[in-house]
Each structure stands twice: as C-alpha cells, then as structure tokens.
Image (cartoon, rainbow, N blue to C red):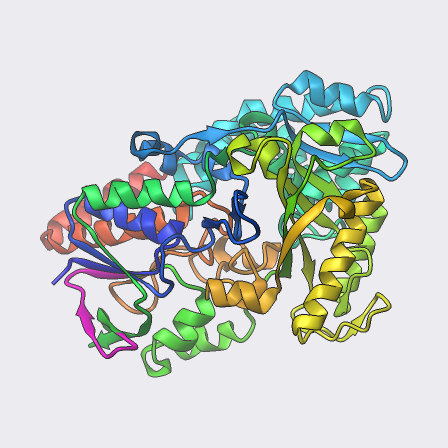
Amino acid sequence: MPDAVVIGAGPNGLVAANLLADAGWSVRILEEQPEPGGAVRHDSGVAPGFVSDLFSSFYPLAAASPVLAAMRLEDHGLRWAHAPHVLAHPLGDGRCAVLDRDVAVTAASLDAFAPGDGAAWERLHAVWDRYRADILGALFTPFPPVRAAARLALRLRGGGGLRLARTLVLPVRRMGAEEFRGEGGRLLLAGNALHADLAPEAAGSGGFGWLMSMLGQTYGFPVPVGGSGALTAALVHRLRARGATLSCGERVESVVVRDRRAVGVRTVGGELVPAHRAVLADVSVPALYGGLVAPEDLPDQVLADLRRFQWDFATFKVDWALDGPVPWRSADAAGAGTVHLADGVDELTRFAAQIAMGRVPDRPFSLFGQMTTADPTRSPRGTESAWAYTHVPHDVRGDAGEEGITGSWDAGERELMADRVERQVERFAPGFRALVRARRVLAPPTLQNLDANLTGGAINGGTAALHQQLVFRPVPGTGRPETPVAGLYLASAAAHPGGGVHGAPGANAARAALRRHRLAGLTRAQRALARRDRTGDRR
C-alpha cells in the first residue's frame, strides 16, 4: 500500500509526488492520459521536423519558482533557452513596444513612444527589485504567507506601502495612464494582464500585468530546450529515481472516503488503490467536489459555493509549421519569443467586452509564440514553429464577426476561427499566410479532451479575478490545500496561488500532508507546543 496516491501527473501532481518521495513516502501517481505532463507536453503532430507545444510554452513563473529551483531539474536533463527579446507588442502603424531582459533596452523602446516613459518603467522596475524576494515568497508559499507577508509589511509600512497597494489593485488601464505618457508601457502592462482573464478595466489587472512584466524583465520567458515536455521529463526522471510509481492511462473514478477520511481511490477499471496516509488531487475543483468526492461526504456550504465557481476564459489555439520567419511589419517583433497582437489598449478592451457579452471576438487578441526564435531545435533552419492562442466565451451567444460561429466548434467552425486568427496575424505581418506549410487547430473541446483539467479550454484553473483569489480560491475559505475530507489535499492550479507552471500548489499540498502526518505522530502536549511555535513564527 503506497503512503500517498496522487491523482494526475500534471506539473503540480509531479511536484507533489517528488516532495513526498523526498520525505521517504512511497507514492503512486495515476494519470488519465497515455503520457504524463498535463498541460506541459509537446509533439511533432503539425509537420515532420517541427516540435509543437500542445498547451503551455513560455515559463517565467517556472524560472522564478523557488519550488522548482530546489528540485535541481537541470541535474535531470532540463535546459532552458531564451529568445533575443522576451516580448513584443507591435501596432498597426509599425511602432512596437519591446520587453527585454536588459532594462535599458525596454526603457529605450518605451521612450520611442513618449520621452520619459523609459524612466517611468525603470521606476516600476526599481519597486520590483526592492520587494521582489518578499513578493515571490508570498506568492509561492502556502496561504496565508505569514513570514513573507510580515517582512513585506515591515518594509512597506507607512504611506509608501499604501500607495503601492493602491497601485497594484488598480485596473491596468488606469495604472498605465498614471505611469506612462505614451502607449508603449501601457501596452506591455495590459497585454500581460490578459495572459490571465483580466480585462483592462478589471480591478487588480494592473498588479497582475506589472507582475508578469517584471517576471519577464528579470527572468525572461524561457522555454525548455527540445519542447515543453522536457520539463515534464525532468520531473518524471527525478521522481522515478526516488522509487515512485507512475501509471498512465489510469483514470480515477472516485475518492474512497471512510469515516470522513480519504483512504484511497477507485479507477474506472474497478481497481481500488489504497492510500496509507494521503490522497493528493491535481484536478479541477468541479471535478474533485462535483465528481470524485461524493456529495454526501462534503459540507452543504462547499457544494453551494461550488455553484458560484467561475472558470477563466475558454481558449482557442492554432499551431503552425512555417516555411520561413514571420514577416513582421515591425522588425523589433522578429526577435521576440512572445508577441501580443492587438492594435492598442482600446482593442484589448473591445476584445474583453465581446467575451463578456458571450460573443466570439471578430479581432481576437492573440498571444503569438515564435518557438524556433526562442529555441532553434524546434524546427529546421530557416523555418519557424509557431502558435497563437486567443480566448472565446464558454457560452457563445453570438458572433461579433461575419461567419456566424455558434460555439459548436465542429470542423467547419474550427477552420473559420483559425482563419480569423490568421487574419489577425496578417494585420501585423503581411504575407504570413503564404508561409503556412501546415496548421493544427485546438478548439476548447479539443483542449479538454487532451487534459481534463482544461474544462472548456480554461487554462488557469479558474478565474484570476480578485473575487476568486487568496482566501477566496477556489471557494471562500482558508485558501489552503486542505479539503473538508481529512487526508485529501487539493494540489492543482485551482488552489492558491493559481495558474501558471511553478509547482506551488503541488508543493503546498505535499507539505500540508507531511505536516499533518508529523502532527498525528506527536503527543497532545507536543502538538500544542508545535502550534504555539507556529503561532510564534507568525508574529
């Protein structure tokens, strides 16, 4: 009997299993798909010789994550690569804002929009540099992040702290207007905010856009050499070296609960897999509380809260094999790994408003990835392996375009939407479509079929809006990985701190399970002392 069963071999499940194995626990992972990785996988399915990431591609949070850094995945074959520039946001008139790991290069790009905006960017970066360690500490530790938050509060005490807090909860449109005279800095912040489902007018979108921008400024948007699955391969290699068992093609049907405690899982094949100490679930919240755990084993309030759970936007993705480099109208975009495609902040607002109204956007804001630019191993010399993804409503109530897309996402609608995405690229790179050797379309249902956690193509484990973060993630409560069922821990992006490939939800769940097991072995007096020590640590 394994000490722990982990449901799901996505990055968080693999991180959780590694940390449990590090502590000497025996671990078995059950993964529904025929291969591990969740949303961190690649293949050569678009064209021979072209490597395409199926889901995620660029990993600033992985580069910043102390969880992954401590695992020394480079010792297990992982190597990182960077594009010459981190990110570019071109406009239709040929101007282009550039985010580069060299602050001076970023600043010069923004000064081209408005003199003085480079200095404004440097001031924002100085704030990040001053508080970066404590911000990352608060981000990547279990909620509440007591020690990191206390250090940050001490450093921010007084009016300066209140002013920074105000800035971070601003909508990104307002933050950009307060910080920059020209459009360049505003574009970088707003485009990065829409890496999540945060419209330019959403509260807190300024803080998220700033965080993503500063992560790119400091760590870049690196990619694993050879394909995103190289990150998964390193996690699996490390895990197997510690004796854990990984079983793919094994779908878990239910969590077995006895006397209000998780004691194992049952697969669709009828196998009962017992867990001596814990079950960790790298699954979405609706899948856990709405399916794997029977309603009678959950408090009524959790079931009521689940009805208010909000997904992030649905996602539509196109992969391409290109016969040459993308012919960007702006030369600065050619060296960027990630390119944001929207002709200004107003177009970003228009895009987000169309989604809010249930309409398929007619000019879809697209994140465009130039993978060979970032990692030359991804395709033959002189070609480009590329992709773009955009967002669409979960519940389509109309089409803002002229094709009458209904959201059925049948073969015809997939091709119509892929053509629309290509036309968006053509606006900034005339001649792009003539370079397409092959393409692959991944509509929301396709993404979900490839990874059940991506319900309707939602890639963030739930909205990143303030009402579903911190103590509200995934439902109002403590924001911690513990669930109402003893011995069952939430280890997915649905838990704090949320989406992105950084391993923190898996690590938090593993540490919670280890802590609970240690406390269970103590006497009552020892447990009281341990609680008092933890309380003391928080002061």
Residue pictured at 56% horizontal, 34% vertical: 221
- Does the magenta portion include 271? yes
Image position, residue 395 (x, y; %)? 68, 73
Q: In the shown orientation, is residue 410 left or right of residue 250?
A: right
Q: In the shown orientation, is residue 229 left or right of residue 14?
A: right
Q: In the shown orientation, is residue 32 left or right of residue 84?
A: left
Q: Quadrant of residue 125?
A: top right
Q: Quadrant of residue 327?
A: top right
- Does the magenta portion include 320? no
Front residue (pair 516, 210): 210
Residue 271 in the image: above or below residue 478: below
Front residue (pair 506, 180): 506
How many marks the image carries: the answer is: 0
Residue pictured at 62% horizontal, 24% vertical: 84
Image position, residue 254 (x, y; %)? 31, 75
Residue pictured at 23% horizontal, 79% vertical: 270
Q: Is residue 256 in sight in this rendering?
A: yes
Q: In the shown orientation, is residue 92 left or right of residue 249?
A: right
Give the residue furthest to the bottom.
296
Q: Is residue 352 in sight in this rendering?
A: no
Q: Quadrant of the C terminus?
A: top left
Image position, residue 171 (x, y; %)? 73, 46
Give the residue furthest to the top.
104
Q: Quadrant of the N terminus?
A: bottom left
The part of the chain drawn in magenta is 267-279
Q: Quadrant of residue 131?
A: top right
Image position, residue 275 (x, y; %)? 18, 64
Give the residue furthest to the right.
93
